[in-house]
Amino acid sequence: MKKRPLIIGIAGGSGSGKTSVTNTIYEIFKEHSILILQQDFYYKDQAHLPFEERLKTNYDHPFAFDNDLLIQHVEKLLQFEAIEKPVYDYALHTRSSEVIHVEPKEVIILEGILVLEDERLRNLMDIKLFVDTDADLRIIRRIQRDMKERGRSIDSVVDQYVNVVRPMHNQFIEPTKRYANVIIPEGGQNHVAIDLVATKIQTILEQKSFL
């Protein structure tokens, strides 16, 4: 097997627990060479738009992401080349002038709600995971997060969920489940599924002579 980084795609709806799965896998392999690349950093640059127009951005729609840049960066990492990861300014609703230098690693976790939506991204992945959690748990987690961390009211969170998050999940995120090699119910709480995935990752890394 050709020696190239291992790419793991982890998708799932907002509040599904995909970040917990991502962090758990990272912790298992952190003694080796691993990095997390979040799709959220790759929202499109909207500096050319008036601020009022930026406020209308639907961050749960595939069009919100600059997948062309993300794919370029993943391909560079696959060649063991460093990248300058963009940073998104949520206050200004556009890309920041800041970038983050990222060195290539032997394992790359690509995490985000729609990382399995783009066929070009899927074709770069060795393992594709979908974290599948019931809608009632996802909205509870989102309410807790947005009220605690972002100071939002419960009415605003529920309104956004009903009018944007839920329909986008049903239309774009949920259908990508069919592309997953492994579906993980209940996210980070599913230790059996995560252990099985970790074993597979270990096997592939051994085949690549990384371990």
Image (cartoon, grey):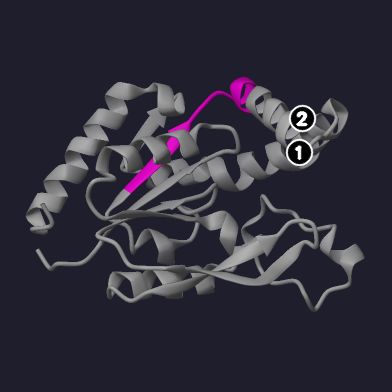
Q: Secondary structure at mark 1?
A: loop
For disc 1, the marked residue is 150
Q: Are marks 1 and 2 in contact (CB under 8 Å)?
A: yes
Q: Is residue 155 left or right of residue 109?
A: right
Q: In front here: 209 or 190? A: 209
Q: Quadrant of residue 44?
A: bottom right
Amino acid tagged 1: Arg
Helix, strand or loop at label 2? It is: helix
Residue farthest to the right, as pictured: 52
Residue 132 magenta: yes
| Residue range highlighted in magenta | 128-138
Where residue 96 appears, as percent x and y from the top left, is: 69, 69
CA distance for labels 1 and 2: 6 Å
On screen, 185 above or below 97?
Answer: above
Note whether 43 is above or below 183 in the view shown.
below
Name which residue lies at 10% across and 52% down.
Answer: 211
User: Dot 2 corresponds to which residue?
Assistant: 147
> Which image quarter is the N terminus in?
bottom left
How many other residues sit within 10 Å of disc 1, few (<14), some (14-19) or many (≥20)? few
Percent position of residue 134, x then y: 55, 23
Rendered view: 120 above or below 148:
below
